[in-house]
Amino acid sequence: MSKLNRKSVSEWLDSNEEIGKEIVANFLMKRPVFWKEMVEQQTHHTVASRRLTLHRLSIAGAPGPLLPFAGDCEGITSSGVNMKRFTSGPIMIPKKSKDQLRKLNKQDLFMELLKDVISPEFDVYSLSHKILVNVLLLIDGDRSSLFFVEGSKENPILISRLFDVTAHSQLESVLHDDSEAIKIPFGVGIVGQVAKTGELINLKDAYDSPYFNKEIDKLTGYRTKALLCMPIKTSSGEVIGVAQVMNKHNDGEFTEEDVEVFNTYMTFCAIGLTNSHLFELSFTHSRRLQMLLELTKKLFEDTTSMEEMIECIMSEALKLIPCEKCIVVVVDKKTENDVTFKIAIQFNGKETETLTTIDPEHIDGYDVIIKVAQTCEQIITNDDGAQQSKTTLSISSNSNMLCMPVFNDKGDLMAIVKLDNKLNGLPFNDMEQESFQVFSMYCGLAIHNVLNYEKIKRANAKQTVALEVLSYHAAASLDETERLMSMSIQNIKDAELVSFTFDDLKFTDDETVLASVLMFKEMGFTHRFHIDDKSLFRWVLTVRKNYRPVLYHNWRHAFNVAQAMFTIMSGRIGCQFTDIEKLSLLIACFSHDLDHRGTNNAFQSKIESPLAQLYTTSTMEHHHFNHCIMILNCDSNKLLQNVSSETYEKIIRVIEDAILSTDLSLYFKNRSKFFDMINSGEFDSSDVIHRDLMRGMLMTACDVAAVSKPWRIQRRVADLVMKEFFQQGDMERENLNMTPVAIMDRRKIDELPQMQAGFIKGVCLPLYKVLAKFSPEFLPMADGAQFNLNGWEERIKSPGIDHKYFVCCCPFRSRIHFCFPPIHVYHALYHRIHTHSCQRNKYCESEAWID
């Protein structure tokens, strides 16, 4: 005989087709593993593609961990796919009629029936029906049923939705829904024993087996005799189903040949069923991921009510796993044994019941919920009602429960969700448990958000109450308001408020209030913005009351800053600003240091004060602005109550920008841009950005205006600032064990002239010079700052010069200059007025500052 090779065998088979078909059929029937491995290799690419598809789904839309993917046969049982019918539109392979099939010999019949198994059929029930009909044809059985393994790994169960199939039955007549499906636990009945042991059972008479339940025959009227049960296994030997054939025709029994054919055919069927299961699993994954995306959208919508959120959770939970009953309990867990319930909502049938006062007797499964709350572990019971005896079967089940803890992103227990009795009567399978675990993660975040919202809501309520109390005690009294309103303001009108050399010591505290009211009236704000006298007086008095009695940043400082702004806006500069801007700037000046504590932003950060935690930048300035808004919103003194909402928003925005601009760090950030804009002549009053920048610079110019005033005022203010700074330095040294910066270090008091000169030279004078270049109206401020700078530099050169110099305020172009009169000996008085001959003007008042 010549040597065989692939080519010669192939040619011989082609030329002897009938004999070749018989040889191949016999070969495959005796060696089914060979055929199975060949088909599995062909389907491997398809499985890998589906894995990739699911992986892309997880990247595109799956929040949290992916649901389990059964990429191989072993995953079918553990995943427990819900076998709902799915129409896939398979590619049909032409096949012979049943009459034609019966005329074929066994080898031809076997090969013909394999077409149903290897066809790309994705509807698992359509494929299962074909398999059962084909099995009946192969071994000449009367009826057949197919059971799939479902449920969890710990409690698997056999489900048959296709039973009592005959060779002539149609799929629609033998396919049953979940309520009519047969459910058999592992180990119960003949089918259960086959699934449990993985071994086939061939009975000549089923009644001879102790596992057979005769009650079924009594109910149906069908007499079961011969019975052949065959396990359907994966390549690894895991049982994924059981096929059962009853009663061989002609009252015969199933032979060893029938068993071999049945076993071989079911080996191939396992491949087809695995592919169908994989496809259905892929579809189920996609559907559940879509449900989770929709759930995420619903849970994180603007839901602010806990009851609404829980009802949404229950609704989505019952969509994910349809059940008879659902209960959600929000938990407040302090310790393992200290668990209280805030609210519980349970769904019974079609109604929901809210239990705000939790009574254990009113909560189904209270003991289980308490246990889950204490252990933070899920509890699942799949009581199939089939443990009474080894032959008992269950057609329906109503004793299943899934109770799962719900955590937030920090792992804190937020709630417990309990589901009772799936509507299909089946136990909770592994996929449902893992899906529900993912679901619970989103529920935890949603509940956490609602609880945070409720905390914020309560905090806002407390804040509102606190503000009401604060407003009452912070607001000026009506008696005080009426007293000030009855005072004459004639003396104030004669005091020349429009002056860069104004000295607030001319006024008492009450007169500063009158002067403040006069500024609003002189600017026409009371008429333009419909501000009544009572509201205006009470607002000014309230602002004064809300300044703390610190050495420098007090009401007097705010009043002086407002007076400087009033002076600027009373000149030609004011024409470049709108009434809204001018009113906003005046309010901002009065309010820019409200509730100042005598310490700066750096100190607030060092002590980690609540203000520093609330405002990370421009700490005190933000606080001043918020305090300003609080006073403006007080019912007793709503200064802006008669303006439109649009005007009010504009005013508040300008006030905020103005107050924040008094932070010198912002001044240094913006001044180079402002200086370039003025020096290049590019300032455009119609440009919003230019106007914003100008307003900020004017606020700084007014805030430090004391350096431009007559020497006696500048010296007095410098002394107050120094003492306030030293107090902060003392606190840093004593309480924080830190060495304060030089300007706040009491030990460096002798360096005050150097520090003051540096402040004027580095901060104030450059700004005043640029403003003077923009408008000559700022020359008094520039000259005054230069004059005081010279004074401090003289004191650096000659300590003790304060005993010899005079400060002159001459009417000559409103300039301030040094006078050098003959040296006189003065008594050690704090203030004293003298008249002397001035070189620049014949008469001027001068004041000697004597330490």
Image: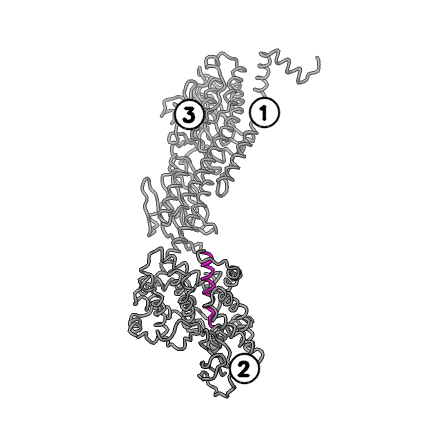
Q: Is residue 697 magenta?
A: yes
Question: Mark 2 or mark 1, which is nearer to you?
Answer: 2
Q: Which colour scheme is used?
A: one colour
Q: Relative to 809, is 219 on the left or the right?
A: left
Whole-percent x, y for residue 618 in the image: 48, 62
Q: Do the residues labelled 2 and 1 touch (CB within 8 Å)?
A: no
Residue 258 sits above or below residue 701 on the image: above
Residue at the location (30% across, 67% down)? 533
Q: What residue type is labelled 3?
A: Phe
The residue that label 2 is drawn on is: 801
Q: Does the magenta stretch include residue 211?
A: no
The residue that label 3 is drawn on is: 163
Indicate the secondary structure of the residue bearing disc 1.
helix
Residue 144 sits above or below residue 750 on the image: above
> Marks 2 and 1, Cα distance to the nearest angstrom?
110 Å
> Marks 2 and 3, Cα distance to the nearest angstrom?
116 Å
Mark number for residue 38?
1
Q: Are marks 3 and 1 in contact (CB under 8 Å)?
A: no
Q: Judge the density around disc 2: few (<14), some (14-19), many (≥20) Cα neighbours within 10 Å.
A: some
Q: In which quarter of the image is the N terminus?
A: top right
- Say whether disc 2 or disc 3 marks the residue closer to the N-terminus: 3
Whole-percent x, y for residue 639 in the image: 33, 63
Question: Mark 3 or mark 1, which is nearer to you?
Answer: 1
Q: Main secondary structure of the magenta part?
A: helix
Indicate the secondary structure of the residue bearing disc 2.
helix
> Marks 3 and 1, Cα distance to the nearest angstrom?
31 Å
Residue at the location (62% across, 14% down)? 13
Please tell me which residue lies in front, 780 or 805: 780
Q: Judge the density around disc 3: few (<14), some (14-19), many (≥20) Cα neighbours within 10 Å.
A: many
The magenta region covers 688-706
Q: Residue 158: which quarter of the image?
A: top left
